[in-house]
Image (cartoon, rainbow, N blue to C red):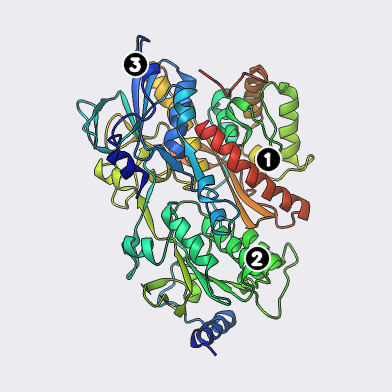
Amino acid sequence: MDPTRILLSSLLALGMAGCHKAPPKAPPAPPPAGPPAVDLAKLPPVDGVSLAHTCAGCHGTEGRIKSAAFVSLAGLPAADLVRTMKDFRTGKRPSTLMGHVAKGLSDRDLEALAAYFAKLPKDAGKGGQP
Amino acid sequence: MKRRDALTLLGLGSLALAGLPRLGGNTPRKGRVVIVGGGVGGATLAKYLRLLDPGLHVTLVERNPIYIRPYGSTEVLTGHITMKDLDVTYDALHETYGVEVLIDAAVGLDPVKKLLRTAGKKELPYDRLVVSPGIQLDYGAIPGYSAQVAETRIPSGWIPGAQTALLAKQLQAMRPGGLFVLVAPPNPYRCPPGPYERAALVTEWLQRHNPTAKVIVADPKDAFVTDETMLLGWNRLYRYNPPDDYAKKLAAKVEVKRHSEGGPITWIRAKDGGKVKRLEAGSLQIHTEGGVLKADVVNVVPPMKAATLAFDLGLTDAAGWCPVDRRTFKSTKVPDVHVIGDSCIADAMPKSGFSANSQAKVAARAIVEELAGRPVPEPVWENTCYALAGMHYGLFVADVFRLVDGKIARTNGPDRYLPLDASPAQIRLGARYQQAWLRTFTQDVFE
């Protein structure tokens, strides 16, 4: 048998059995819990432009995207977007990650965001040409 | 030969590749912003500055005429895409957004006269300079490893390029039953789930093409971002048995299979001896604190710090990263200079393309408003890192951030990962979103 294979298989066996020799000094374990939760209501308001910018990485610059996977947000009625995000937040509407994002935004944020997208035309030619 | 060298030979090294007609003329300019570094941070910033204020004169200085995107580059290793698929041009930044793209390298700055000096002997005046230089790989931090070894024998490819292609070739030529070792980096580093996604995709590929091969991740850490969801994916896809403490935590929420015989992938944490002490490039022996691994192909993701340029321009702190005011990304070291992306200190934000994109937009708004004499808007940031445990097994970390007591803090609480009890349909959808994101994200940055 190839000696490297013997070394590998014995090493794997050791690793699996937890006999892999421990390092001389283990680094301290990271703190189990993160910082205390942020109270969104106590933070200053953010405007719709800045909020919309955070969506663009998936939903397109100025909320316009040609994608089968992600929804274009430009021109969506504000009430619809707010309701959808709130439903994502509570889990009433299932999501992959939008529920997590919605939990990081306040109701005020959702309203500012939705008002901004509602004003944008659905189609403005290529991107947001200056 | 690198593309840049080829251009230099052609005498184009310091010419603006994408000419100047749109910007040379009569339009009154409300300010000059010079950006150094055409990665995700710099490109996003250039585009968004021009979107927010078409009156600004924006110059992007970048050494390479073509950007090789790092996000998704692991798919080159498994042949899902080719190196060419990683190429992104600056054409749209120039043609659609009127950004002046200068193919040149920054070499120094005069903070008093507010001039950036380039290798091409240009002096670019600025009202604001934004540096988005990315990371450098500290090859020398692991004894036996070096840039030369990385280029010839043990590639890294964490900054994608020739090393990515070399690693793909090595993997595809590995002997049947060979051992692939991925040496994971210490914190902080670019793309936190990336090394584990790479190990997973390599394992998936090997199962099909080299089914007796093995994969070991040697890690100087005991945990990583997305660890529970990633290890659960390995458990389901690759007969991986998570360490007992993880198995216990996972089993409280979801069924974890106990495989009588372990699968092809092994994660050796710091506490199990995973920290690498030195490498032998000739014999491909990896000396860890727990023993010696005799590998057939090795991929090292070295420790990282801010790119050399950040050091050269005097923007770094003792730890090798760039301190900034979080609201504006203004350097605390040099006036009128901002630093964004992987090289800056951004607290709870990971070093990711999504973070750099989000930071660029916050910096763009701060610059536009300040140059106009208005107050800086209240910032908000987001990050999503999609990662794959297999080509059809998607997971993620997603966070929203706000400024809290001068630091960047997460606001979405404990919910940030794929739920452990996610359905198979949600998991497949995550993978589909990951693939879609690679395209939509590139569009938001460059197009």
* Amino acid type, callout 3: Gly
Side of B335 where A99 appears, left or right: right
Is label 2 in contact with label 3 (beta carbons under 8 Å)? Answer: no
| Alpha carbon separation for disc pair 3 and 1 | 44 Å
Is label 3 in contact with label 1 (beta carbons under 8 Å)? Answer: no
Q: Position of residue B333 (x, y in %)?
A: 27, 38
At 63% from the left and 71% from the top, the residue drawn is B242
Give the total number of marks visible in the rendering: 3
Residue B17, labelled with which disc?
none
Side of B87 where B254 appears, left or right: right
SS class of the residue under badge 2? helix
The residue indicated by pointer 2 is B234
Q: Chain of mark 3?
A: B
Asked if labels 2 and 3 share a chain, the reply is: yes
Q: Chain of mark 1?
A: A
The residue indicated by pointer 1 is A98
| Alpha carbon separation for disc pair 2 and 3 | 56 Å
Residue B24, labelled with which disc?
3
* Amino acid type, callout 1: Met
